[in-house]
Each structure stands twice: as structure tokens, then as C-alpha cells.
Amino acid sequence: MPQDHRPLSRTRVLLAEDQGMMRGALALLLGMEPDIEVVAQVGRGDEIVDAALLSRPEVALLDIELPGRSGLDAAGDLRDQVPDCRVLILTTFGRPGYLRRAMEAGAAGFLVKDGPVEDLAEAIRKVLRGETVIDPALAAAALSAGPNPLTARERDALGASVDGATISDIAEALHLSESTVRNYLSSAIGKTGTRNRMEAVRAARQQGWL
């Protein structure tokens, strides 16, 4: 029987990671897999969609905390603009709230960075087959933590509170009245069990709600 010498089909992967050394190492290691090809690399979240539209990856491997736009927000953009691309979130921060937000954004998988590259390669293969891949310990933590109690507007108000922004600054950025901003911040402070908005920001970040 004649042998089939056709080249092995390689899964096209986009890699989004802001640390250049980590990004290069991941691309090199994944590129050593016989069935995986890294076709695009970006260091900013606001570059992900354009790179995906250009390179047409089958799987996008996204960090969460990226300059310009978070990987979680970019995951939602990819779902809408490049629907054939499966998203796998890979992050240092295994926070329950992040997992819930990733699933809401349409991500097919969520892994923390401390695992071996072989597990990552296998996760890419699984999400390409239509499976969902989630770190087991993080999944258990997310179930026990419960849903994010903050509304979208409360998250917006807290997110705009960083870097010493005033109530007026936040109101202008969100196109809201100052009284409405105060109400959102007061509600967020109450829900996080904190004393002020800076503490609320820290608490929400620790839970992965922001």
C-alpha cells in the first residue's frame, strides 16, 4: 500500500503576550510541535483583532492583562469578528472571576501559566476539536466563589477610578453625571465590603471581577 507523504496539517495559532521573552519562548516551544504553527504574535490587546483578521488563526492564545485592551475583552471581540477562531486564555492570575468572564466572552479554555508546554499544546488540540479546557482547581474555586456581584456600570466606574481619577474625571470618561458615578461607586464599595473606592478596586481585582 503506498505511503501518504502529504504534509501534516498544522493548527494556526495567534499568541498575545505582553512580555517579549515569555512570548518568544512560548512561540518557540509551540513551534516545535509537529502540528502547531504560530502565525501571529502581538504584545498588546488592541492589536489582537487586526492580527487575527490578517493571519486567520484557528486558535488564539491570549494573556489577560495586556496593554491597550484586556485579553478578556479581546476574546469577546474575536467571537464577534473572527467567529471561527477558538480562544484559549493563558494567564498568571488564576482568579475565579476571570474564569467566569472568560466563559461569558466565549473562550473555549482557561489555563494558568505554571503548567508544562505539553499540556498547553494538548489544550490547543482539544479546543480545536470543540472541547472546553479549564484548569480543574480554578473551576472548583470559581464554583465556590459564586458570580460576580458587580454590574457592568459598577465595574466601569471602578475601572475608571485608577490613577487618582476624580469623580468629575470618571463622569466625563463614562458620559455620566457625577451623582450617578457616586451611586455606582457607593454600590460597588458596599458589594465588595470595603471602605472606599481604592479598596474596592483592589478587592475586585483580587477576585477577577475587573
Image: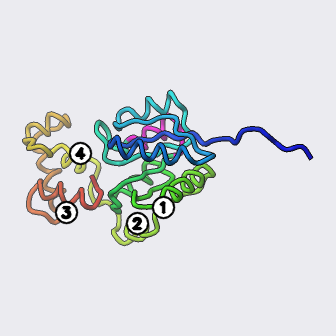
Asked whether 202 or 16 is in front, the reply is 16
Q: Main secondary structure of the magenta part?
A: helix
**Mark 3, residues whose alpha carbon is within 10 Å: few (<14), some, or many (≥20)?**
some
* Residue depicted at 48% across the width and 39% down the height: 14
Q: CA distance from mark 2 to mark 3?
A: 21 Å
Q: CA distance from mark 2 to mark 4?
A: 25 Å
Q: CA distance from mark 3 to mark 4?
A: 15 Å
Q: CA distance from mark 1 to mark 3?
A: 26 Å
Frontmost of labels 2 and 4 is 2
The kind of residue tagged 4 is Asp
Asked whether 62 or 190 is in front, the reply is 62
- Left or right, 16 with reference to 83: left
The kind of residue tagged 3 is Thr
Are the residues at dot 1 and dot 2 in contact (C-beta closer than 8 Å)? yes
Q: Which residue is mark 3?
A: 192
Of mark 4 and mark 1, the one earlier in the sequence is 1
- Left or right, 184 with reference to 115: left
Q: Which residue is mark 1?
A: 134
The disc label shown at residue 146, or none:
none
The kind of residue tagged 1 is Ile
For the record, the magenta segment spans 74-86
Measured along the vertical axis of the image, is residue 172 above or below residue 2?
above
Q: Which residue is mark 2?
A: 138
